[in-house]
Amino acid sequence: MDTIETTTIETTKIETTLNSESHVPETTPAAAPAQPKPKQPRQLVRFTFYKLDPQWQHLPADVREQGRAELIKIYNDYAAHDELIKSYSFYGVRFDVDFMIWQATYDIDNLRRLNSQIRRSSMGPYLQEVRSMLSMTKRSVYVGKHARGSHDPRLVITPEDRKYLFVYPFIKTRPWYALPMEERRRMMAEHIRVGLKYPSVSLNTTYSFGIDDQEFVVAFETDDITDFLDLVQELRETEASAYTLRDTPMYTCMSESIEDILTNLGA
């Protein structure tokens, strides 16, 4: 009993002495671990192709004018919210589609909202969606991070407002994905070198793995249709081209305001 009490007293004296020593540094709290930098967000991209039913043109002029104004307002209201939306025409080029709307957004509900508004508009029952392609921006596995920097422009769709946009779905063969990454990079380097020979043509590649039927959606912008034709012909001769499973249908889109498209369609 005495031993325990003495030990307790002596321990208390030692602790008091240590705490009073000014030369003993206080314990510094451990620094909080560094938080990882937030990833650059990716955009959802949709290409929607429409065909106007000829029966629309048989409706009274005032009905058509009201429906036309309603559709233009829906389009412009969407654009006013800083969402990417661009319209392209096909009349005189393709028989199966009249115009296309290109969208890019960070929220899939924005795509759904616009689609719903168009469907419920006066013109909606007369607009057939011939085709749509959904995709997403993504970093290329064939371009090193040092070449992109902290901000990868491929994650943000920034159209260059060229006259032509060439859009098509793209699927590679399964054997392509079985190749070693270095082998694929070697072949894609040739592909990229060919593309650099045509500076008038810019490329927007987006990815559809698991979210739509194609694997990629390829969209080339240019003011020179001849350069694009020559580029595609030369790309056919590259080694990587042998691993293409499908790259059709190909759409030659011409940039035009939604107002002019509807006017020129006789809507």
Image: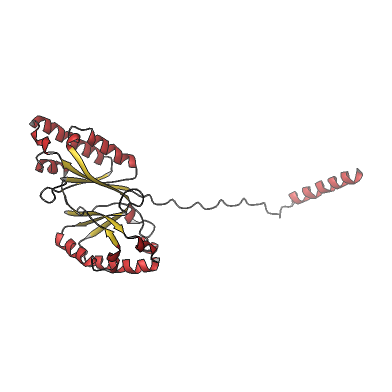
Q: Relative to 164, is 260 above or below?
A: above
Quadrant holding the N terminus: top right
Which residue is more in the foreground, 261 or 179?
179
Q: Is residue 47 visible?
A: no
How has the structure been colored for display? Answer: secondary structure
Task: Report the number of discs.
Answer: 0
Q: Position of residue 156 (x, y in %)?
A: 32, 52
Quadrant holding the C terminus: top left
**Displayed quadrant of residue 193:** bottom left
> Left or right: 90 with respect to 211?
left
Give the residue drawn at x 11%, y 38%: 54
Give the residue drawn at x 39%, y 68%: 182
Give the residue drawn at x 32%, y 60%: 173
Q: Relative to 11, is 144 above or below?
A: below
Q: Position of residue 197 (x, y in %)?
A: 22, 68
Q: Position of residue 27 (x, y in %)?
A: 66, 52
Give the residue drawn at x 17%, y 62%: 229
**Displayed quadrant of residue 60:** top left
Q: Relative to 45, is 124 above or below?
A: above
Which residue is more in the foreground, 106 or 132?
132
Q: Is residue 110 visible?
A: yes
Which residue is situated farthest in the right direction here?
2
> Left or right: 48 with respect to 31?
left
Q: Position of residue 75 (x, y in %)?
A: 21, 39
